[in-house]
């Protein structure tokens, strides 16, 4: 029995100082109705305010809160180049489930970014659940995070990138 799995690029680490995606804010807080421009990373409320008028083909991303139902974004996924999922605390893992659902249930092919309290120890599970990008917390080492991706060469359970270890290593007998 053959299983089809998504092949995702290796998890990339984003330097927040050099990020090509940008948010909009002013002296009084975020702009509620942003003017379309490439590579805007909008809050969910901002996206809802402009999605009906947002130009087709203009790259846009959404910062999605971890306490919201990711299914509410499903209809918009074909228009989104990036979905940024929040880890408000490193002990709160709801964003893992959101990423997994984006990749497996809705076959989302755009970038899924981890933001917030992102620690090196979280990186292997992020890669397994469908994240393609991570913005590490400022005190975390990118080199250590890259090493962490190689700690576990295989898993018994399947993930969004590969079949389970026992399927991939089945003997030809």
Image: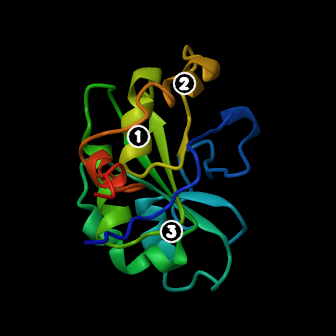
**Could you tell me which secondary element the residue under label 1 belongs to?**
helix
Residue 61, disc:
none
Q: CA distance from mark 1 to mark 3?
A: 16 Å
Residue carrying label 1: 126
**Residue 114 location (% of width, % of height):** 46, 42
Is 62 on the left-hand or right-hand side of 38? left
Q: Is residue 4 above or below residue 23?
A: below
Residue carrying label 2: 145
**Residue 105 location (% of width, % of height):** 29, 70
**Residue 69 location (% of width, % of height):** 23, 60
Q: Residue lying farthest top?
A: 139
At label 3, counting other C-alpha atoms closer than 10 Å, the crowd grade (few under 14, some 14-19, many 20 or more) is some
Q: Is residue 41 above or below residue 71?
A: above
Q: Is residue 2 above or below residue 167?
A: below
Q: Is residue 31 above or below residue 144?
A: below
- Which sits in the foreground, 104 or 80? 104
Q: Residue at x 25, y 42 (%)?
A: 156
Q: Are marks 3 and 2 in contact (CB under 8 Å)?
A: no
- Which sits in the foreground, 62 or 163? 163
Q: Residue at x 42, y 33 (%)?
A: 124
Residue carrying label 3: 109
Q: CA distance from mark 2 to mark 1?
A: 11 Å
């Amino acid at each position: 029995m053959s299983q089809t799995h998504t092949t995702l690029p290796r998890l990339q680490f984003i330097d927040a100082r050099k990020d090509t995606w940008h948010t909009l804010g002013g002296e009084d807080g975020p702009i509620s109705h942003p003017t379309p421009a490439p590579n805007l990373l909008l809050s969910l409320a901002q996206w809802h305010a402009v999605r009906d008028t947002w130009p087709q083909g203009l790259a846009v991303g959404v910062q999605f809160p971890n306490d919201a139902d990711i299914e509410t974004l499903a209809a918009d996924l074909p228009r989104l180049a990036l979905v940024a999922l929040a880890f408000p605390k490193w002990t709160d893992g709801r964003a893992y489930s959101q990423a997994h659902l984006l990749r497996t249930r809705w076959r989302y092919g755009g970038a899924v970014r981890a933001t917030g309290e992102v620690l090196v120890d979280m990186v292997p599970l992020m890669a397994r659940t469908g994240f393609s990008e991570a913005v590490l917390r400022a005190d975390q080492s990118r080199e250590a995070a890259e090493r962490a991706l190689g700690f576990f060469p295989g898993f018994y359970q399947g993930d969004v990138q590969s079949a389970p270890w026992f399927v991939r290593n089945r003997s030809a007998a």
